[in-house]
Amino acid sequence: MMGKLLALAALVASLLVASPAYAFRLRGAALSDRGVYVMLVLRARQIGNGLVGTLRCIRGSAPCLFGRGRLSATFAADGTFTGGLLSGNGRTQCAFAGVLADGGLEGRYRCVRDDGAWDNGSFLVTP
């Protein structure tokens, strides 16, 4: 009986490790060049030399251009990265670039919404 429980536990653990669930979560903020900020929650997983994931924006001192979106980024050997984001409703696109920093990511972004609203600034997300 104990052997069956251990085998079941090992099977469940292997499924969890092999699942496509997001491997890590980072939290932080985006500070607009206009002096306002929003809070960010990034859930992502590494694929090769890049990452894919989702981003959630939470109102800070200003409203978000979008609530949720999907992102991807590609990393260079020197720790820099570039990437893009598309909001969940497809109305906002962002480009970003930066560097690995303290186990997280920091850099610059530029977002444009299809109604003409836009923003650019800096971001920092850490574990």
Image: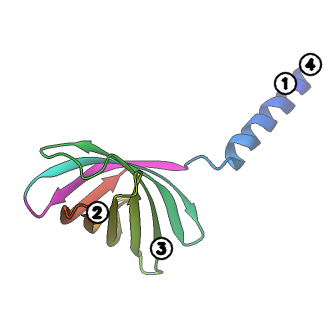
Q: Are marks 1 and 4 in contact (CB under 8 Å)?
A: yes
Badge 1 density bin: few <14, some 14–19, many ≥20, Cα 10 Å: few
Q: Say which residue label 4 marks.
A: 1
Q: Which residue is mark 2?
A: 114
The x and y percentages for residue 43 are: 46, 49
The residue beneath circle 3 is: 74
Mark 4 vs mark 3: which is more N-terminal?
Answer: 4
Whichever of labels 1 and 3 marks the residue nearer the N terminus, that label is 1
| Horizontal relation, residue 95 to residue 9: left or right | left
**Residue 17's spot in the image, x, y percent?**
68, 46
Q: Are marks 2 and 4 in contact (CB under 8 Å)?
A: no
Question: Which mark is first along the chain, 2 or 3?
Answer: 3
Task: Assess disc 3: are there few (<14), some (14-19) or many (≥20) residues with their C-alpha within 10 Å of its C-alpha.
Answer: some
Q: Disc 3 marks which amino acid?
A: Thr
Q: CA distance from mark 2 to mark 4?
A: 61 Å
Would residue 124 appear left or right of 5 to someone viewing this image?
left
Spatial distance from mark 3 to mark 2, Cα to Cα?
25 Å
The residue tagged 1 is: 5
Q: Amino acid at mark 2?
A: Asp
Amino acid type, residue under disc 1 in the picture: Leu
Main SS of the magenta segment? Answer: strand
- Which numbered disc, 1 or 2, marks the residue that appears first in the sequence? 1
Task: Classify residue 104 by image quadrant.
Answer: bottom left
